[in-house]
Amino acid sequence: RHPKVEAETFEKASKGVRKSRLDETDTTIVKDIVSGRYVGFEKFDLTDVGAVELGFVEKPAAGWQVEVRLNAPEGELVGKSVLAEKMQVVLSGKNLAGICPVYFVFRNSKSAEASLGGLDWIWFRRKDVQ
């Protein structure tokens, strides 16, 4: 799999998360992400991955953070970052090798109902290229 993944190719997602085409473009994004919702990718090889970078259509508002978890939305936490400050999440953990499901869980400490701007892509960065 290429290290840059189009977010709309997720294989699992919370109820309510949807794919949407941007007006008058060929770009498809992930929308309707509110606090607690997630997207997941099955069978992803995390060997030599040291960080993930998230690409949004617009900069997330204050209060948003992302958690990167293995095997399930409530699985082992291997990375966490506040999205308004940076769009990169450094990963750490003893299970970061081999193929497993990867979940991105989004949380907003300021509003449970606010919607995160459209998620366009996720780039899995190698440890030696961060």
Image (spheres, helix red, strand yellow):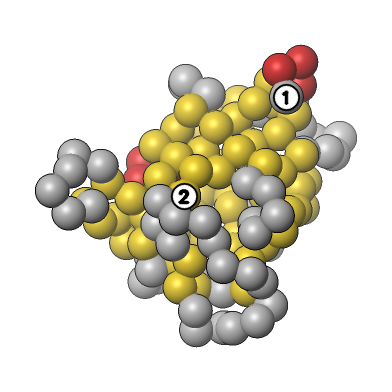
> How far is mark 1 from mark 2, CA to CA?
19 Å
Please, which residue is most extreme toward the left here?
A: 24
Q: Can residue 118 be seen at all in this image of the molecule?
A: yes
Please, which residue is most extreme toward the top here?
A: 128
Q: Position of residue 17 (x, y in %)?
A: 38, 65
**Up-down: is 103 above or below 2?**
below
Which image quadrant for residue 33? bottom left
Left or right: residue 115 compared with residue 28: right
**Residue drawn at 71 percent across, 43 percent down:** 89
CB under 8 Å between callouts 1 and 2?
no
Which image quadrant for residue 20? bottom left
**Residue drawn at 60 percent across, 60 percent down:** 105
| Element class at badge 1 | loop
Q: Which sits in the foreground, 67 or 54?
A: 54
Q: Amino acid at mark 1?
A: Gln
Q: Can residue 11 be seen at all in this image of the molecule?
A: no
Q: Give the class, few, some or many, for how many residues have Cα within 10 Å of label 2's Cα (few <14, many ≥20).
A: some
Residue 56 is labelled as 2
Residue 130 is labelled as 1
| Element class at badge 2 | strand
Q: Which sits in the foreground, 93 or 50?
A: 50
Q: Position of residue 82 (x, y in %)?
A: 71, 59
Q: Give the class, few, some or many, for how many residues have Cα within 10 Å of label 1's Cα (few <14, many ≥20).
A: few
Q: Position of residue 85 (x, y in %)?
A: 70, 55
Q: Which sits in the foreground, 79 or 102?
A: 79
Please, which residue is most extreme toward the right here?
A: 94
- Report the label total: 2
Left or right: residue 16 compared with residue 90: left
Q: Amino acid at mark 2?
A: Phe
**Up-down: is 79 above or below 1?**
below
Q: Which sits in the foreground, 66 or 70?
A: 66
